[in-house]
Image (spheres, rainbow, N blue to C red):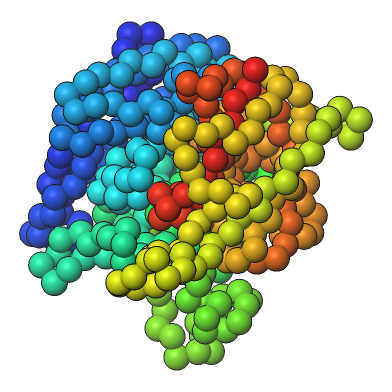
């Protein structure tokens, strides 16, 4: 839907019924549709007016992930919409072009609501993105690709349980792309832009093509990179977005793979050359998650990729005032928790505290750069911050690779390593409507790996 006209966009949060598998329906949640919500398109320097109506009989908060907007319209858990109520945030879009998203952020039930379908994409355009020669025909050579994984029972119904999730979160068995299993898209014989969103609750993916072809990453979470980065594979953690360009000028087809990183690592120890792995091992060639097939009747974008995309200005070291440390931890809850599956009862904390709706964990000053040092004492976690885009200075103890040197709002932490970001907030978030930082494994978030902060 076009969000640049100013009048409010009606977004009905509702129950649905969706067939992931042909002929089998399962209860789902959606926004204006049975599963997921419409792509909302907006522009820098315009006002995006949304009008959410909650027709469910549970409360729902809907967060604009990646948006630089004040805390009172951010859609965090403090902004839950009661059953039957409406919420009409007016969002002043000031940030540059980016692929963002919106999703449930309801206290304690984010995992379950996103899993059932409460998520959608937000695309922001600006003058820079208008002018760089990149594919931009939505649905033709510019495609939203929401990657999720789902588990179905023997009747084909969705299965989800926060209680039974492992310590790694709820990992689905089947990849779904925009709600479909192994869909096929007809694309022109030219460059195709994929706006990838890892919208899974907990799964880290390795994204590659089945023929190991090169592609170019052009954007991270918060917008265009300074230059395209050639890759043959990349990791995507939950919550992350990126835009890639794949060239189909030669015709034929391309098969996008979204491999389960945990399984590759279990099998081989490290993520090496995927192609070798599949040809050498007994592992069957994985099913493509999305197949692109050339249709020569469609208008093709064949211009060469520009060398320069956007200008990214990093702060001077002297501008970075203040350092904050965040330690993410998972610990056994101890003997007072009894019953099923030990993992589910782990305490999930940041700096020793689990999320408390009545506690503000950090207080920040508006417009000031800070260095945040974040570390995991156990496990891998995608750390996300509301209300901003940040720059990664260090990732898992090393310098950020070129394809991570753009604006981000998710940074990956591994066991025992520090990641470092530099971050600045330009909008206020009050005690009543604070921002959140949290692990984007939704089961970790729902179990408390989240904190609240104000910006004044
Ligand atoms: Cu995408 Cu606080 O979340
Ligand atoms: Cu967010
Ligand atoms: Cu986590």
Q: Going by the image, does 199 lie left or right of 113?
A: right
Q: Quadrant of residue 287?
A: bottom left
Say which quarter of the image contains residue 324. top right
Count of numbered circles on the image = 0
Q: Is residue 354 above or below residue 107?
A: below
| Residue at x 32%, y 24% (from the top left corner) | 1
**Residue placed most toward the observer, 201 or 251:** 201
Q: In this view, does 411 lie to the left or right of 123?
A: right
How far across and down, in percent of the image, does residue 445 sit? 45, 49
Quarter that holds the C terminus: top right
For image coordinates 45% across by 35% down, the residue present is: 357
Q: Is 238 rendered above or below residue 156? A: above
Residue 15 appears at what percent x and percent y? Answer: 15, 39
Say whether residue 174 is visible: no
Q: Which residue lies furthest to the front in this view?
A: 336
Q: Residue at x 32, y 45 (%)?
A: 109
Placement of 134 over or under 414, stated as above or below:
above
Task: Residue 283: tell me if it is visible.
Answer: yes
**Pick the front one: 75 or 39:** 75
Question: 392 left or right of 447?
Answer: right
Quick one: which residue is furthest to the top in this view? 6
Residue 387 % position (x, y): 57, 28
Residue 384 appears left or right of 306 = left
Which residue is at 47% across, 49% downward?
A: 448
Q: Where is residue 373 in the image (x, y as percent from the top left)?
A: 74, 47
């Amino acid at each position: 839907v076009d969000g640049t006209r100013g009048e409010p966009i009606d977004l009905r949060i509702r129950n649905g019924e969706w067939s992931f598998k042909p002929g089998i329906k399962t209860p789902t949640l959606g926004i204006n549709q049975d599963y997921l919500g419409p792509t909302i398109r907006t522009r820098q320097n315009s006002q995006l007016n949304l009008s959410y109506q909650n027709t469910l009989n549970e409360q729902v908060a809907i967060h604009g992930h990646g948006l630089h907007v004040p805390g009172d319209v951010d859609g965090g858990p403090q902004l839950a919409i009661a059953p039957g109520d409406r919420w009409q945030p007016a969002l002043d879009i000031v940030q540059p072009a980016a692929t963002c998203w919106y999703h449930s952020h309801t206290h304690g039930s984010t995992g379950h609501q996103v899993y059932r379908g409460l998520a959608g994409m937000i695309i922001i355009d600006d003058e820079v993105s208008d002018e760089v020669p990149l594919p931009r025909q939505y649905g033709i050579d510019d495609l939203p690709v929401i990657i999720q994984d789902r588990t179905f029972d023997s009747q084909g119904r969705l299965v989800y349980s926060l209680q039974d999730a492992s310590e790694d979160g709820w990992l689905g068995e089947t990849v779904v792309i925009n709600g479909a299993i192994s869909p096929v898209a007809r694309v022109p014989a030219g460059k195709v832009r994929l706006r990838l969103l890892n919208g899974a609750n907990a799964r880290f993916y390795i994204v590659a093509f089945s023929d190991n072809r090169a592609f170019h990453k052009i954007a991270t979470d918060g917008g265009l990179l300074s230059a395209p980065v050639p890759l043959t594979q990349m990791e995507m953690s939950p919550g992350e977005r990126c835009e890639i360009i794949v060239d189909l000028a030669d015709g034929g087809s391309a098969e996008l793979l979204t491999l389960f990183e945990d399984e590759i690592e279990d099998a081989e120890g490290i993520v090496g050359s995927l192609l070798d792995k599949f040809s050498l091992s007994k592992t069957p060639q994985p099913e493509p998650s999305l197949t692109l097939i050339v249709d020569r009747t469609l208008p093709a974008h064949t211009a060469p990729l520009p060398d320069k995309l956007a200008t990214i200005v990093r702060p001077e070291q002297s501008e970075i005032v203040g350092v904050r440390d965040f330690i993410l931890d998972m610990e056994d809850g101890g003997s007072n928790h009894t019953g099923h599956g030990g993992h589910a009862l782990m305490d999930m904390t940041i700096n020793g505290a689990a999320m408390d709706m009545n506690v503000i964990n950090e207080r920040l000053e508006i417009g000031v750069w800070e260095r945040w040092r974040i570390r995991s004492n156990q496990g891998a976690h995608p750390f996300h911050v509301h209300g901003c885009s940040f720059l990664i200075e260090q990732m898992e103890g090393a310098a950020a690779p070129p394809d991570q040197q753009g604006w981000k709002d998710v940074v990956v932490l591994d066991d025992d390593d520090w990641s470092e970001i530099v971050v600045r907030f330009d909008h206020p978030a009050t005690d009543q409507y604070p921002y959140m930082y949290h692990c984007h494994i939704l089961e970790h978030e729902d179990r408390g790996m989240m904190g609240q902060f104000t910006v004044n």
